[in-house]
Amino acid sequence: MQVNGYKPLIVAFCCNWCSYAGADLAGNNRLSYPADVKIIRVPCSCRVNPMFILRAFQRGADGVIICGCHPGDCHYTSGNYYTRRRMAMLFSMLDYLGIERERTRVEWVSAAEGAKFAATMNDFAEKVAALGENKRLEDLRCKQ
Amino acid sequence: MQRIGVFVCWCGSNIAATVDVEAVSEALKLEPGVVFSTNYQYMCSQAGQNIIKDAIAEHKLTGIVVCSCSPRMHEATFRKTAAAAGLNPYMVEIANIREQCSWVHKDVPTGTEKAIILGKAAVAKVNLNAPLIPGETPVTKRALVIGGGIAGIQTALDIADAGFPVDIVEKKPTIGGKMSQLDKTFPTLDCAACILTPKMVDVAQHENIRIFSYSEVEDVKGFVGNFDVTIKKHARYVNEAACTGCGACTEKCPQKKVPNEFNLGMDNRRAIYIPFAQAVPKVATIDPNYCNMLKNGKCGVCAKVCAAGAIDYTQKDEYIQEKYGAIVVATGFNPISMDKFDEFAYNQSKDVITSLEFERLTNAAGPTAGKLLRPSDGKHPHTIVFVQCVGSRCDAKAEKGKEYCSKICCMYTAKHAMLVKDKYPDVDVYVFYIDVRTPGKNFDEFYRRAVEEYGVHYVKGMVGKVVPEGDVLKVQASDLIANKQLHIDADLVVLAAAIEPDKSARPLATKLTASMDTNDFFTEAHPKLRPVESPTAGVFLSGACQGPKDIPETVSQAGAAASKVIGLLAKDKLTGNPCIAHSDEMMCNGCSTCERVCPYGAITYMDKEFRMPDRTTAIRRVASVNPAVCQGCGACTVACPSGAMNLRGFSTQQIMAEVDAICK
Amino acid sequence: MQAITREQLINKAVALLADGTVKYVLGWKKGEFDYDITPAVFETAEELNADFVWNDFCGANFSKYLVAKTRKLDGKILVFLKPCDTYSFNQLLTEHRFDRDKVYAVGIPCNGMADIAKVKEVCGDGISSIATEGDALAVTTIYDDEPVKVAVESVLAERCLNCKSKKHVAYDELMGEDGDTLDSNRFDEVAKLEAMTPDERFAFWQNELSRCIRCNACRDVCPACTCEKCVFDNPTSGVENKAPANSFEEKMFHIIRAFHVAGRCTDCGECSRVCPQNIPLHLLNRKFIKDINEFYGEYQAGAEVGSRAPLVNYTTEDLEPGEVFDRRDTNA
Amino acid sequence: MRKCSLDSLNAVFAKIAEAAELYLPVNCTDGSAAFSKWEEGKEWSNNLNTVKSPKEFFFPQTEDLVAFKTSGKNIEIIDTRKEREDFVVFGVRACDVKAFEVLDNVFLLKEPYDSYYTNRREHGVIISVACNRPADTCFCKTFGIDPADPQGDISVWKTADSLYWQANTERGAALLEKIADLTEDCDTAAVDAEKEKITKIMSKLPLANLTTEGWGAGKTQELFDSPIWAEMSEACLGCGTCTFVCPTCQCYDIKDFNTGKGVVRFRCWDSCMYSDFTKMSAGQPRLSQKERFRQRFMHKLVYYPENNNGLFSCVGCGRCVAKCPISMNIAKVMKKIGGKENE
Amino acid sequence: MSSNKKFLQEELTRMSGVNPKKCMKCGKCSGTCPAYDEMEYHPHQFVSMVESGDIEPLLNSKSLYRCLTCFACVDRCPRGVEPAKLVEAVRLVAVRKQGANHMTANDVPAMLDDDIPQQAIVSAFRKYTK
């Protein structure tokens, strides 16, 4: 994925039960999405600590997306509800600090939604690529 | 420092076609901790696994990374491989370079570059892995079956026959479920009661089975092998032990105008009733909504006529606590409401009925004693129109019905048509269908018999509207083959209503922490390989609560669920998932934040004396995780501000190492 | 001028010491000047009479001290709590951070505390004495012969200008009159920032946070930051960092700190009071409070003991993270 | 002695900035002052002091020491040091100038010299300025510092309309030479009058009578176990404000930052008030806040003078007095010992 | 399929917002259609023919002007296909062609009749003309 010649780096945290399986399904169905998206498997979206997200930006990520089960479908019943609150708050704060809101996203992708997974990643990668390099949450030491 | 081995799988050409596996294994050789790296056509094959085993021995590996297909596919395989070679199975990490790399990317440079990065992340993670040993918990050797239809009955019988005690919780006053309401069963046309009631009797008489009828599951705590369940037994105002089921009360009760739900409201019962003759338990139940004695204290006829003295107007709801090792959900289905289908005039005419109502209408024990009579005027119908797919196979956006095929309608409609023609050859029978779906043993033959032997008119097309006019129902429909619009004056219209999970399923799923799909069917742990297990350990699925099913399928799934339960209860101990939360007591604030987010109540607190950094001692409140209860979601790890809570197998440090590796 | 006098407080403390209710008194101790007041533990009437002060500069929130003090001290401790302090007190109790049985809490009314920096803006540096005269402060400097009179109202600390409550939500005993919770304008500044463009907001925070010297005063004074060990001090946490080596780390620290106290922060304002660089840190915390109120319903941390903080709670109908922005954009 | 009018100040700054980077205190948005690189339009702050001391110019809060790059299993060591450009710091107060002497004793006394510090020291010219309006928190006099007569490469006095310049070193003289066009020769009368005024003010300051009595070399045994430490440290939050605003605190920690592609080894200010200060594998040597609190003041007032010919490592700038969140400070500590312990 | 057909097909689906692929060929639209017998091509055929690109016969069919736009088919379609909207779209394509108006102003006086509300004629005129 390139927009204006910029190839973004995207970290996707995927819950083991739904979204990671959704990503697998996208693979099974050979639905392509940009290779810039790198998936990290977590047991549940609620395992994603805001520190991981900031860490990713620090280390050079241009976008971070968190994927979990649809609300109500959490394997652990309530994990994604916590994720929803935590990330709503975190994203709001990042926006408050003037960080581009398009760089972060939460998306609910079920194990059956391989197509949605691919479509989401395509869309997200495109939006992030359009923003260009992450300048507002970067650590230059990591870019040398 | 770990000694890590990297094993890159070609997966034939599945990976190797888009990923330069050689380049990946070479690149990963340079990663910190990696002492050995190789690639092979099929790592999951015996030969591939031997490569791993040999390398573990030869290079004294402490951790391995397999770059292969999804961990959901072969993580367990490679963990076993590692264990066989004497390595802790949790020292294995999988880099998913097939589903999430080679299969989604087109060109080799891209695929290779990404595969290397995914490999690096796995290496970074395994560098921080520690051997994990699963905990063990005892198993309560008793099963709970929720729902007493044919699914629950069969499951309970199979488990009980294997020697384990089983409790059935049924919310109706009797077990039997939907099947007890059916007339005949396809494709053999044997009578439902004839094959079901012996099983109900078996249940009642089985020494290993207890029935909690007129009861519901109130609360579920605990976890696989150790569920604590509270069962709410509704007051039936009749002493079950004393009642002989003689039925004297049900004949003398003066309150005669209670719609009989067993006959779907097509006739009436008394306020005290036994749902049907073969009910199990055969015990009367007082309906508190209609009983004059309970409503205003005036009556008491039933108590007077009861020779056994079983009537007890003061009975209260009872709560029963019981421990179970396994829970089987068999909550079944219901036809959907026809309220949104005005075009079929269901609410306007008594002569438009659902198929389940039709079952009662042809049932010898039904409101018409098995005679096919119109509900409106009791006349014999001459033209009957069956409409298939009412509310099934609908677009989600139409918001009227269900997206799925209800699966059983084609067959029971053929059955109904045949039964009509069998009893009343003079009746014209039309069946409007979109597709006739008959995959099943002897199913298509059955349907063809209806057409060829009985002369049922099968019309490819759909009924557009039904208008009651005088004592006929004007049916307007399309015949797609003839490319005509048909206008039929029918006496009776039977709608094959879609079926949906019972309404009690959703709240039950919440109590069980079992997942459901958007249609409220319980989700199976794997659609193909684990079809009768819920993803929640220890919870199993039987019958239509998992998806639409006919009786043969339900019974076979019930048996399958039972065999899974038996397998579980046969174990003395369960080994748990070691990837669970744990708290660093020195870091813990005892603030209860983690406790509040834990969906399993796995976290408790205790006061402990600690030596503080300044050499003083202090009593501090600290969290402790019950390893048998924790399921490893990690909600607590983020809620914990001090980072005292961490998750084994997905530790903060491991995930950060992955982030770092991916982002570098 | 405060409604309760120093003498009344000393008498109360002395009486409670005398009848054995408490063994220690946590109070304000006079300093070199009339405004540099230090929290201290008093044990005798003599100490109290000599050094205890209560004036318009007693801003320090004592709640947090109870965590360490109740752990160490062998007897009950008297603590004086201003209305805003009682919220922190309750929040700490909710989190089981101190032993309630070892504390005797006396609620005292507060008319707002003066900010010495604001006094100096008016009177200049070189203050030699400050005396309270009714609702004004008489400030004498070495540069002026006559004391300058400053209305306390005009030099109130920001947090006191936007006081959320004059009501005590916890105490064993209340001195003076209890007040009510107030409708404050405390979210106005946040709303102003929200109304800016992202670029302006970024510039604003870049300017503010770039001054951070990571002295940790905000964290160390914060009654919500009572972790046994902060993740930023913990080498095994993966995010340890000691210095704001660059603008990322400044943001990281303050975002994560605000996130960790989100739903737990009572908006006591201590963080901004102690910041040597005058960074308006309360605007980060208030942003979260404002968001919580708007997204999940009004919630005041510490209003009652045992309440479930919004971030450890949920409803199935919560708004989606993406909707946060739609919501603001339509409001704006 | 040279003089220039205050009106021509901008031109003077411009001239200096032509020769070298010029830094001076400017007002921040919050009303405090901080050193900032001069450029057209930036004005010299009227504030007495900056929040952060100018020690940052020579000993920054964080600085990279060396970098390591890894490629495969090879490690390459990269010397990241660069020669500092010449720079001028204008507006340094007498106390802060004295603080450089304290730092020099740490970093430059004996070999091996601290090359990072040396590099900056060699390229920096310090222009001090006398304090017309000392604050209530000032107590430089306690340490023998005269704010009327500040040191540095150039000393500057400000009167109502003019600025008076006097070079104290060769580097200072060279710089004055560069702005000769904008300044004129003058006598010292105005400056002398200013000095007298300052001296008079100094005697009126609240802390004017604070002395180092009871402190200094050789006092370790006497003061170490004093009960005052427990009492004074009672309220200490253990934050690092005092150390980080202090012009003489020179402790640092060396840390490695893994960039993912290698390691940057950097040093950053550390605070003896922190619980992990000088933490080693065996733990930290000072376990309680009392011990850490004691360390800070004993170091400034006893250990340092013991090793540096009696020179105290406090210059009385008053920053910690103004900034401590709980208003505990060195002046209170000194008085407590000087008062009660020595009675 | 020829490019012209394909273009027309895309144009129709775009204009109508109807996705004919969603049709499961149950015929309920035609079963419910009150104008069925008036129409040469029935609602389900519209859907099917648009899907297969066989649009020319529809454009030339009087069926276009027999559809009452009563939306019964839209309401009752279990798949949410909305055939009436597709009929409408085909009609628009037809009348938008130069000289292809189904009604002209001259036709109107002959139609005036006390039994037909004038509004119906006006709306029909609007509907059948460009």
Image (tube, rainbow, N blue to C red):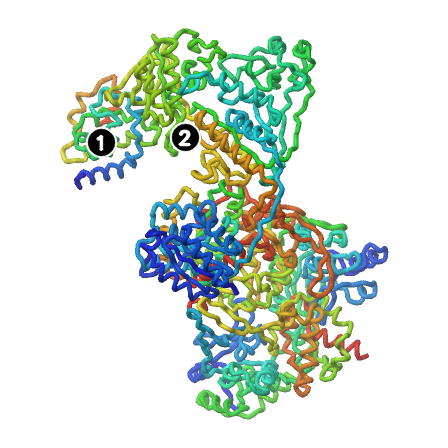
Q: Position of residue B434 (x, y in %)?
A: 32, 25
Question: Circle 1 is placed at which residue position?
Answer: E49
Disc 2 chain ID: B
Image quarter of residue B203:
top right
Quadrant in which the N terminus of chain A appears: bottom left
Please, is residue B128 above or below residue D196 in the view? Answer: above
| Marking on residue C102 | none
Between residues B108 and C164, which one lies in front from this camera angle?
Answer: B108
Few, some or many residues within 10 Å of mark 1 (<14, 14–19, 20+):
some
Seen as rendered, the residue at the extreme top is B379
Question: Circle 2 is placed at which residue position?
Answer: B402
Amino acid type at image mark 1: Met
Q: Which structural element holds mark 1?
A: helix
In three-dimensional space, the C-alpha distance between marks 1 and 2, rounded to whole angstroms, equals 27 Å
Quadrant in which the C terminus of chain A appears: bottom left
Does residue E87 appear anywhere in the picture? no
Please, is residue D275 above or below residue E76 in the view? Answer: below
